[in-house]
Structures are given as C-alpha cells and as structure tokens.
Amino acid sequence: MKITFPHMGRAYIPIQGLLEKAGLETVVPARPHRRGVELGARYAPEFVCLPFKSTLGDFIDGLEKGADTLAMVCGMWACRFGYYGRVQHQILRDLGYEFDSILIGKDDLMTVLRKFISAMPKKKRLRRIVAAIVMFRARARLVDEWEWQARRMRPVERISGSADEVLSAFFTRLETAPNLRSVRRLRREAMKALAKVPLREDRRPLKVALLGEVYMVLEPNLNLELERGMGELGMEVHPVLTTYRWLLKPFRILDPRIELTEAWARRVSRPYVRYVLGGEEHWTIAGTIQAAKRGYDGVVHVYPLTCMPENICRSILPKVTEKYNIPLLDLCFDEHSSPVGIRTRLEAFGDLLERRRSSTPAAGSG
Ligand code: SF4
C-alpha cells in the first residue's frame, strides 16, 4: 500500500510521521501550487469550493508519483465536505486512475482501521501503533509551537522574514525526524536558533484574530501567505483554528481541551447560528466575540468564494462586530485571487486599526 493524502498547511508532517511509524509507505504530494489548482479546477464541478479543486490536484499529483491508495477525511453532510472524498475519487476513476479508497468518516472506524492494519508489517503491530500515535502527537505539537513562535516574532523582527527562514529549515528536518529523541533535539536547536533572531523591543504589534473556513485559514499556498503578510504589516496573528486543533480533533482523548473548546464555541455561537452547518461557523462567530472581549484590534475572516457555511457567517458577522465593536475584514478567495489585491486590502485594514488604536488608547490592550 502506498498512501497519499491531500495537503492542508503543515498537517502532512504529523500525518506522514503517523503512517510511516506504523510501517506504511506514504507518497506526499507537492505542496499546493497554481498548476495543481488549475488541474483540480479543470476536472472539478465549476462552482465547487476552492479546497475541493486544490485537494483534487493533490490527489492527481500523488497518483502520478506512484500512490495506489487515496486517504481522505469526510465531513458530515451539511456542507460539501461530506461529498469531497466520494466525488473526487469518482472523478479520478472516470479519468482512468486505479486506486483503493480510504474514506475516513464515511466508512466506519473498524473498516478504516482494518484496512490500515492489514497493510502494516505483521511483526510488532501493537508496538508500531503506539509509536505511531506518540510520533503523531509529538510532531503535531512541535509544528503548532513553531507556528505560534513565528506569529509572535514576525511583527517585531528587525529583518523581515528571519524567523520564517530559521523555522523553514527546521520544518524540513522535522519531516524526516525518525524518532521522539530527534524531535526533542530539533525543538531544543530551534529554540536556540530563534533566540538569536534580532527583535525590536519598541514595537507594539496589532493583535488580530484570523478565522473562517479551516482550509483557507491553514493553507498558506492558497491564502497567498496571509499570516506572513499580516505579520510583515505589524499584526500578531491569532488563528482561531490551528493545524494542531484540526488534527487532534478526531483523537480528542489525546487532548481533552479540544473537546471542551469545541463545546464552548457551539454554545457561544448558538444565538446566531442555531444549526450545525458543517463547517467552522461556530468558530467564526465565537472567535469574533472572544477576540472583541479579549481586546484584540480586529478580525480577519477568510473563506472560499462558494463556501456555504462561511457565506452565512458573512451575513451574520456585521451584526456581531457592531455589537462587540471590533473591526472586520472579509477576504474571499478563489483561484483568481491576486496577492497584490489581498496585500492592498490588508495594508488599508492595518492603517485603520493603527488609527483606531491611537484614537482609543484602551483598544488593543489585553
Ligand atoms: S466549509 Fe465551505 S469550503 Fe469547506 S467544504 Fe464546506 S462549503 Fe466547501
């Protein structure tokens, strides 16, 4: 079995660790890029959301690199995510590709586990499974820790891009870290390297929450390096959803805080969205309210053009932001979005937040 799976931010690093520690062979597709999205867009239904097109492009790349099994998480049926895996795999079969499907969430858990376990080497299976889970969690935590460090450092760096430069080398090394000891060593080395990055102590960054559809929040190659761009403009970005949270959600037992915050977001957003829409609507609404209560300077809401849950949020958010008095920037992406257009809107938003903060000194504290 040679398994491939689509990208979403740096989720591939822990997923690859999990599968390889279990003794399975993986084929990681190239990071999402324009040609992949174009390929996906060519074969996908015209009005389907952008992540569908991008992940379809990932599967094509994985198959062309020799994968024979496609693994995909399936959402519930409220939004298109529930159909992603099935429809994508059908499109690929119509194109003539032959492969086995693992649809996590559609097939019951035992079927999925049986498929994985039957492909594992026969010896020491239990030990391999435990090692795989430990490696998955360790890599996921380190990816999360480094991503948060980059967010805090970008707006106060003396030389723009230095923290990212340091971390990108460590992320590459983490991809091939063979065991827990090497993961821990990388963590120590990265801490030392980051401590040498010169920072400006006199800067007070704007605090901005980033929320919306999870794929657009987490995939820098599709959101046109949004976090990095916001950091360069003096914004300390606080995404409401992170790779770690998304990855650990199905394994809540490994981190019970995930379950608690999920329930909290549903409760806080209920007055505005009473039903489950299938996406991140509860996080978008609850995250905006939380950002206002914590004294953030603003909120950036990102989503793909035809995203059903987030378009509903888009019509609700003006009410929420007015009630809680927090500025909002909506950024809608499709395959034609331009980096220049996004940058211009971010610059204007940053200016607005700076002016607002200087005229109301209390805002932005906290
Ligand atoms: S949340 Fe939006 S973008 Fe994601 S699958 Fe559902 S409709 Fe598509």
Image (cartoon, rainbow, N blue to C red):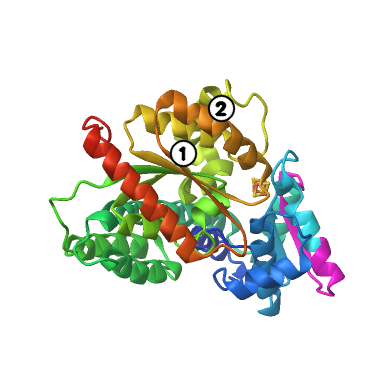
Asked whether, in this view, residue 235 is left or right of residue 302, the answer is left
In the image as oriented, which residue stretches furthest toward the left?
A: 202
Residue at x-position 51% and y-position 24%? 268
Query: Residue 94's mark?
Result: none
Q: Which residues are magenta?
A: 90-109
Asked whether, in this view, residue 328 is left or right of residue 295, the answer is right
| 60 is higher (above) or lower (below) than 17 | below
| 295 is higher (above) or lower (below) than 156 | above
Q: In the rendered image, which residue does mark 1 sit on?
A: 255
Q: Would residue 37 be counted in the magenta stretch?
A: no
Instruction: Inspect the image, locate mark 1, and give the three-letter code of the amino acid beneath it.
Output: Asp
Q: N-terminal of the two: label 1 or label 2?
A: 1
Q: In the rendered image, which residue does mark 2 sit on?
A: 266
Instruction: Inspect the image, locate mark 2, and give the three-letter code of the amino acid beneath it.
Output: Arg
Asked whether, in this view, residue 39 is left or right of residue 313, the answer is right
| 105 is higher (above) or lower (below) than 10 | above
Residue 222: give x, y in percent of width and height. Answer: 54, 62
Residue at x-position 52% and y-position 27%? 319
In the image as oriented, which residue stretches furthest toward the top?
A: 271
CA gap, disc 1 to disc 2? 18 Å
Mark whose residue sits in front, 1 or 2: 2
In-front residue for pair 95/328: 328
Q: Can residue 112 be seen at all in this image of the molecule? A: yes
Quarter of the figure that contains the N terminus = bottom right
